[in-house]
Image (cartoon, rainbow, N blue to C red):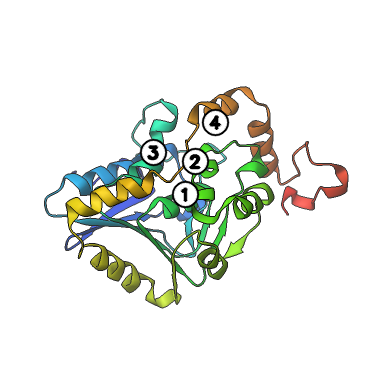
Amino acid sequence: MADDLGAAGLRFERDGVIGWCIIDRPEARNAFTPAMYFGIKRAVHLVNNDPDLEAMIITGTGDVFAPGGDLGGRTEPGDLPVPDIGHEILPFLTIRDSRAPVVAAINGICQAGGLLVGMMSDIAVASDRATFRAPELLRGIVDATYAAVLPAHVGIAVARDLLLSGRRFDAEEAVRLGVISRMVPHEQLHHAAVHAVGEILQSGPLARMHVKRMLNDRYGLIDYQTMFASLIGSPEPREGMLAFMEKRSPNWIPAQFAKDGGRL
């Protein structure tokens, strides 16, 4: 089917000229499988190549937008195979470079890869119930996208704070820091996301494309080579993921600072 994104945890729905990419994997709290990451790329390409569509909104279900990748490595029946080519699976640059506007409607918990989806969208509108976190370093993961993108949004000092601490922050702080740009009462999120699309579509498509390219040049180099070499060669990502699954502290944390359950 034309609107099948190849991932059991994603749905694609049409509303006039808007395509809705809905993250809907409640049994795993919307954690991304590889097929879901690649499915978001498919959704962006679908919207950019369908003459009946002009924009896309990405949102989640329940109280979760997206918490990032499934650390348990689980997949779902119905997931199509994805290319085994490292960063090419990831949707973040595809979202950033989309000719068609992409708006994120962040309805709840938004972490890791989920937050990057929101940050790389043209406009991210968050519910006042949403919470945020960039926890990759807590799992021993070198995230090249965050290292390039977050300082461009919030500056070096705040990027250090958020990445090195991995702390949670709410929607009000996310807007104040510049991680995302808009917050609305939860019940107004759908309307606010559609309104944001309507605002963007007032602009000239060719002019908008050039301005987006110039804006995107403000991001730093995304060093995926180092990121994926670390994922393959370092023992830390495996230990970090095991510790998370086993609800304990990773073995690199000094006993003085280790927490029950492995989570601050």
Q: Residue at x 20, y 47 (%)?
A: 48
- The alpha-carbon separation of the residues under discs 4 and 2 comes to 9 Å
Residue 107 vs residue 236: left or right?
left
- Taking the view exactly as shown, the residue that stands out farthest to the top is 233
Q: Which of the two labelled residues, at mark 2 and mark 1, occupies the earlier sequence position?
A: 1
The quadrant of the image that shows the N terminus is: top left
Task: Estimate the x, y position of residue 62 in percent, counting from the top left.
Answer: 45, 64
Q: Which of the two labelled residues, at mark 1 and mark 3, occupies the earlier sequence position?
A: 3
Q: Which residue is mark 2?
A: 145
Disc ID at residue 227:
4
What's the residue type where badge 3 is placed? Ala
Helix, strand, or loop for circle 2? helix
Q: Residue at x 66, y 53 (%)?
A: 161
Helix, strand, or loop for circle 1? helix
Helix, strand, or loop for circle 3? helix
Answer few, some or many: residues within 10 Å of disc 1's Cα (few below 14, many 20 plus, some between 14 and 19): many
Task: Estimate the x, y position of residue 260 in percent, counting from the top left.
Answer: 79, 52
Answer few, some or many: residues within 10 Å of disc 4's Cα (few below 14, many 20 plus, some between 14 and 19): some
Q: Residue at x 31, y 40 (%)?
A: 6
- The alpha-carbon separation of the residues under discs 3 and 4 comes to 20 Å
Q: Which residue is mark 1?
A: 116
What's the residue type where badge 2 is placed? Thr
Q: Which residue is mark 3?
A: 35
Q: Which of the two labelled residues, at mark 3 and mark 4, occupies the earlier sequence position?
A: 3
Q: Which of the two labelled residues, at mark 4 and mark 2, occupies the earlier sequence position?
A: 2
Q: Which of the two labelled residues, at mark 1 and mark 4, occupies the earlier sequence position?
A: 1
What's the residue type where badge 4 is placed? Met
Is the residue 187 above or below the residue 69 in the image?
A: below
Q: Residue at x 56, y 24 (%)?
A: 229
- The alpha-carbon separation of the residues under discs 1 and 3 comes to 17 Å
What's the residue type where badge 1 is placed? Leu
